[in-house]
Structure formats: structure tokens, C-alpha cells
Amino acid sequence: MKSKWLFYVEDDSVLAPATADLLLHFCKSHDMGFKLLMSVHDVQSALAQLPPSSVRFAIVDLWMNDQEKNTSDRAAGIKVFQMIRSHSINSYIVLLSGHIDAAVEEKFKNERNVAIAHKPTPDEELREFLEEKIKEIIIE
């Protein structure tokens, strides 16, 4: 099992596969494991299978659908953020959303190792961002 992981948490079944392909290639070239997760429950299950501090990067959609209630859950990404941080305190988390506003930016402005990006993010921009972060932090 890999000792370093990148989680991509996205419930959009159209957007997720294309970005997942880019991220999978990125992970292979940096000897990282990759998981595409589509719900808060999926993240819980994945974290339970991994040792603490093994999630080095996470890219998280802030708004996701609650699949059980079939409603939009504006807090889903925040729940995922908190779960990943509890598991892997030094992980770098990119929060993606088409709904970034001042309240979201204020909530995360004092968090370390967090970036907020608007969706959709072009593939090349995402690849460059990840490469830059790899250089900034040491991935053992």
C-alpha cells in the first residue's frame, strides 16, 4: 500500500472522470496513491483504511449532493475538510467550488496548507498548481 495519498472528492459524474485522469497521472509520477471519492461517506470509508497522516493532498468540492436525501449539501466539503484534517493534520487541501464567496474565504483564511479555487479549473492550471505545491512541501 502507498504511504502517500491524494484524495479527489467530487460528486459531479461528468467533471470527476476527466480531472481524475489528470490526477492519476500526477500521482503515478510522484509515487502517490490516488482515490476518487464521490461523497462524505466515501471519504470516511477511505480514511478508515489508511494510516494516520497518509493523505498528503486533497482536492475537495465544497458543495455536494447528499445522495440519501437527494439535496444539495453546502456543508459537505467542510465536513470532508475536517475529517481529512483530523486524519492527516499536515495535508494540503484545495477547496474547489463554483460558489466561492467572502464567507467561504473568511472561514478558511487562517487555515494553513489550504487553497481555494473556483470551478472549473483548467487541467493545465491544476497540474501547474500541484507541481508547485510538491516543490513547496517535502513529500517523504
Image: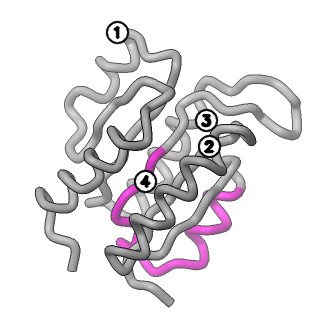
Residue identifier under label 2? 10
| Quadrant for the C terminus in the image | bottom left
Q: Which kind of residue does numbered mark 2 sit on?
A: Glu
Q: Helix or strand or loop: what does disc 3 sit on?
A: helix
Q: Helix or strand or loop: what does disc 2 sit on?
A: loop
Q: Earlier in the sequence, mark 2 or mark 1?
A: 2
Q: Which kind of residue does numbered mark 1 sit on?
A: Ala
- As drawn, which residue projects farthest toward the left? 136
Residue at (34%, 9%) from the top-left corner? 102
- As drawn, which residue projects farthest toward the front? 124
Q: Nearer the viewer, mark 2 or mark 1?
A: 2
Residue identifier under label 4? 58
Residue at (37%, 64%) from the top-left corner? 88
User: In the drawing, does residue 122 fall left or right of residue 73?
Assistant: left
- As drawn, which residue projects farthest toward the bottom? 1
Q: Earlier in the sequence, mark 4 or mark 1?
A: 4
Rendering coords of residue 18 (x, y %): 60, 48
Q: Are marks 4 and 3 in contact (CB under 8 Å)?
A: no
Residue identifier under label 3? 76
User: In the drawing, does residue 12 fall left or right of residue 88?
Assistant: right
Residue at (24%, 56%) from the top-left corner? 131
Rendering coords of residue 66 (x, y %): 77, 35
Residue 102 is labelled as 1
Residue 89 is labelled as none
Q: Which kind of residue does numbered mark 4 sit on?
A: Ala
Which of 113 and 118 lies nearest the eye of the viewer? Answer: 118
Region in magenta:
42-59
Work out how far the residue at label 2 is from the one at label 3, CA to CA, in angstroms: 10 Å
Work out how far the residue at label 4 is from the one at label 1, CA to CA, in angstroms: 22 Å
